[in-house]
Image (cartoon, rainbow, N blue to C red):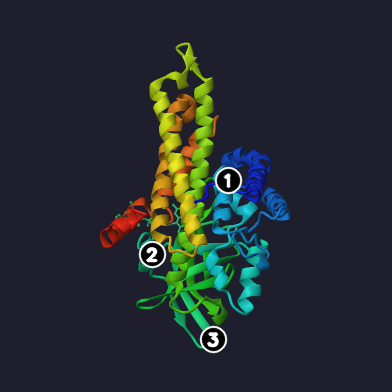
Amino acid sequence: MEFSLNDEQKMMIETVRRFIAEELKPLEDEIEDKGFLDPAKAQAIHDKAKSLGLYAMNMPAELGGGGLSNMDRILCEEQFGHTTDILIRRAFGNVYEPLLHCKGEQVERWLKPAVEGKRTCAITITESGAGSDAAGIKTTARKTDTGWVLNGSKHFISDGEWSDFFLVSARTGEKEISMFMVDKGLPGFTVGKDQKMMGLRGTPHLELFFDNVELEDAALLGEQGQGFKLAMGALNVVRLAQVGARAVGKASHVCEMMVAYANDRKQFGQRIGDFQMVQQMLADSVIEINAARWMVYHAAWMLDQGLDAREQIAMVKVHAAETLGRVVDRAVQVFGGMGFCKELPIERYYRDSRIYRIFDGTSEIHRGVIAKSAMKKGAALFDVHR
Ligand SMILES: Cc1cc2nc3c(=O)[nH]c(=O)nc-3n(C[C@H](O)[C@H](O)[C@H](O)COP(=O)(O)OP(=O)(O)OC[C@H]3O[C@@H](n4cnc5c(N)ncnc54)[C@H](O)[C@@H]3O)c2cc1C
């Protein structure tokens, strides 16, 4: 068992950390005020991150990506948690793993431009009538002689406005779901309103409508009928990286501010960190963050060993998201009125963190998965010696 990081990993963390502190953090307040990221600034951070080899780090090196192992990716994603969603997307990219199923002409049209940062892609599974029940979608793709005809709608699609194409899950048979790559601008494909959210200012979340959109055969990603598997496979890694690791990073960032404030702020002639009730909030946060981090690292290690980590990732999703929720809530409390005041970013972290318990499978859905596995497998799920 080895718990230490090697020198390359430490250097990689330091590079990402410095880039976030110097290039991204200074943009956060402006995005919060205006509600959007200036495209020229988006281009500048993209170009700079790319020149440092920080774009599409999860993609294979032979395609121009970073070729990182799951563990190394997780270490970077933990740092991403220190900043805001839209800045992560523009600087580091959000290239989804199902694109690796591209074959033949698809590689040049969709996969490579996405890895190179020339085309942005969003993933679209959720519909107004099908959220947790992702297999209950109503969008259909009907086979024709020349390709497919797509009909239906999606909602809550993150980054939709910046995206050039979309991975769309659609029903291709009564019990069959497939995935398609759908370019923005195709006749019959319209983009609806930006659905305003509690947090994640600057990231658009769009409705999409497909009205007899004609797709070529080449638009089918992977095999017909494999769409659900592709989507769920992608979400598994996304949950670990973009929810688990980022939640640990964000909770660490907030906890650092909370500890500094507890050291600095004086009431009744002493530091508030000397009051036991404040100490409990600090101690519980530190304990929970450390527990969540090792769960994240362990699940990443399992993936790198080629092991099935689905259950561990479900546990990470719940524990890391809920840890973050508790830590930011305590941070608001420790900061008192300043925690609620927009002069500090604490209230923003509080709003931005709430979604972690909802997207990529709610806590309830993951608890259901964990409980069913526990009932089926017994101690194997929680006793490593079985
Ligand atoms: C900011 C944001 C960004 C998003 N980005 C994307 C995106 O890019 N692409 C995309 O496809 N989707 C995206 N989503 C959708 C997101 O994944 C869904 O919101 C999420 O899966 C929950 O679905 P729902 O909102 O329909 O809630 P519902 O499924 O309607 O759930 C409502 C409540 O019922 C509970 N519930 C439902 N079923 C069960 C059950 N079986 N057992 C116990 N409790 C249950 C849920 O836990 C929840 O508490 C995004 C959503 C948001 C808010």
In this rendering, position of residue 87 left or right of residue 381: right
Tag 2: amino acid: Ala
Residue of label 3: 146
Mark count: 3
Query: Disc 1 or 3, which lies upstream in sequence?
Result: 1
Whether residue 34 appears in this view of the structure is yes
Q: Name the secondary structure under disc 2.
A: helix
Q: Name the residue at 35% across, 55% down.
A: 385
Q: Name the residue at 57% across, 43% down.
A: 83
Above or below, 146 relative to 130:
below
Whether residue 324 appears in this view of the structure is no
Q: Which mark is residue 134?
A: 2
Residue 173: image x %, image y %?
Answer: 38, 79
Ligand 1, seen in the image, is in the quarter at bottom left
In this rendering, position of residue 34 left or right of residue 209: right
Tell me: is circle 2 under 8 Å from ligand 1.
yes
Query: Disc 2 or 3, which lies upstream in sequence?
Result: 2
Residue of label 1: 79
Residue 13: image x %, image y %?
Answer: 62, 46
Of residue 320 and residue 34, the one placed in the foreground of this image is 320
